[in-house]
Image (cartoon, grey):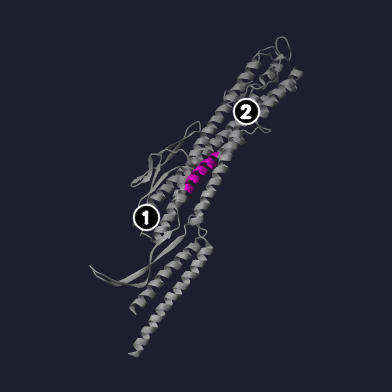
Amino acid sequence: MSDLLNIGASSVRAYSKALQTVGDNISNANTKGYVRRDINLTEMPSGANSLLYTGTVLPNGVRVTGVTRATDQWLVADARTAGSESGRSSAKLAPLQATERALDDGGSGVGKALTAAFNAADSLAADPTNTTLRQSFLSTIGDVATTFGRTAASLDQVSAGIGQTASIGVDAVNADVTALSRVNDGLLRAREGSTNQAGLLDERDKLLDRISATLPVTITFDAKGATTLKAGSDTLLGGATRTTITVAQSTDGTLSYGGVAISGGSLGGLAEAATHVRDQRGALDALASQVATQFNTTHAAGQDSSGTAGGALFTGTTAASLTAAITDPAKVAAATSTSSNGNALAFATLRGSTGSEAGFTALVASQSQTVAGVTAQDAAATARLTGACSARDDLSAVDLDKEAGDLVRYQQAYDAAARILQVARETMQSIFDAI
C-alpha cells in the first residue's frame, strides 16, 4: 500500500511539473528568444539495500530529473556567425545609400550646376557684351559654389549620423555585456536542470545573439553555462574581467574603437562606412579645388569690360569653402586682347574626359557601383541569416501541434496518477472499515 501511495504521489508531482512545462511552452510560443523546454522523467526505484548488498529493486513511481532546452550549439553558433555578417553589411549599407543621395546628380546637383555654368559661358560667347548673359554666367558660378557646399554639408550629416549610430551601438553592447555578466552570476548559482536555469540560458543566448551581431566574438562556456567572450585576442568578458568598449570619431569622420579589436559586425560595418564617406568627401574636395583652379586660371587669362585682367571667380579650395568671388557683371572677363568673346569660348576647353563635369559623373558612378555591391552583399547575408535562423528555430521553436499532443498525454497521465491515489485511499478506508 505504501508503494501504491508513493507511485501515485510521485506521479502527480511529476506530471504536474510536465503540464507546467508544456504550459510554459505554449504561453511563450511567440516570445522571441524562447527555447522550447522538454521535461525529463525517469523511474524512481526503491528496494532494501545495504552498504554491501543491493536487494530487489521494485518500481516506486516516477520523478523529474530536470528540464532541458531543445537546442543545438552548432546551429546556434552558425546563426550568430550569420548575424554578424548581416549586421556588418546592413550597418554599412544605410550610410552608403545616404552618401549616394548626397551625391545625387539631379536637377540641383553639382554636375548639373557645372553643366549650366559651361552652357552660360557658351551663351555669353555668342553675345559677350550682353549684361543679362554676363549676370546669368555669374549666377551659375554662384550655383556651382552653392551646390558644392550643400553636397559637402550632406556628407557631413552622413558622417555625423555614422558617429551617433556607432555611439549608440557601443552603449548597447556594453549594456549587453554587463547584463551577460549578471546572467553568468545567476547560472553559477542555478540548480542544474531547473526552470530557472533554462530561463537564464534563454536570456544568455539572446544577449549573445545581439552582441554577435554587433561585433564578432569567440564564445566559450564553462560547465554551468557561464560565458567567456573574446574579440580577437582581447577578453571582453571572462571571470572578473569585463572590458568597456569605447568609440571616438576623428575630424575627418573616421571611427576608432577602444577596449577590444573590432573587425566586423555592425560596429565594423559602420567603421568601413565612415572611411568610405571620408574618401568620397576627399574626392569631392579635390573636384572643388579643380573647378576653382581651372575656372580662375581661365578667367584670369581674359579681360573684363574695362580691359582689366579677369579676377578669381572662386575663393576657397574645398567643397565647403568654395564661394563665388565676383558679383559685378562688368567684371566678367569674356574678351581677350584680340577677341571680344575669346575668353568666353575658352571655358569650353575645360570640358571633356578630364574636366570637372566628367569627374563628378565618375564620382557618382563609382558611388552607385559601391552601393550596388554592398546591396548584393547585404541581400546574400540576409538570406544566409534567414536560413540559419530557420534551421535553429526548427529545433528550438515551439510547435503548438506537438505541445497540444503532449498536453493531452500528460493530462491523461496526471488523471491516472490521481486515480491511483484515489484507489489507494479507498483501499485503505476499506481496510480500516473492516477492522
Residue 318 lies, in percent from the top left, at 57, 25
Q: Secondary structure at mark 1?
A: helix
Q: Amino acid at mark 1?
A: Leu
Residue found at the far left of this picture: 52
Residue 408 visible to the viewer: yes
Classify mark 2: helix, strand or loop. Answer: helix
Q: Give whichever of discs 1 and 2 has the lower sequence position.
A: 1
Q: Which residue is mark 1?
A: 187
Q: Nearer the viewer, residue 184 or 116?
A: 184
Taking depth in this image into account, of 242 and 383 the one nearest to the observer is 383
Percent from the top left, x then y, of residue 361?
64, 28
Q: In which quadrant of the rendered image does the C terminus lie?
A: bottom left
Q: Give the number of marks.
A: 2
Q: Which mark is residue 362?
A: 2
Callout 2 amino acid:
Ala
The relative height of residue 183 versus residue 152 in the rendered view (above or below) is: below
Quick check: 193 above or below 377? below
Magenta region: 78-92
- Quadrant where the N terminus is found in the figure: bottom left
- Magenta span has 84? yes
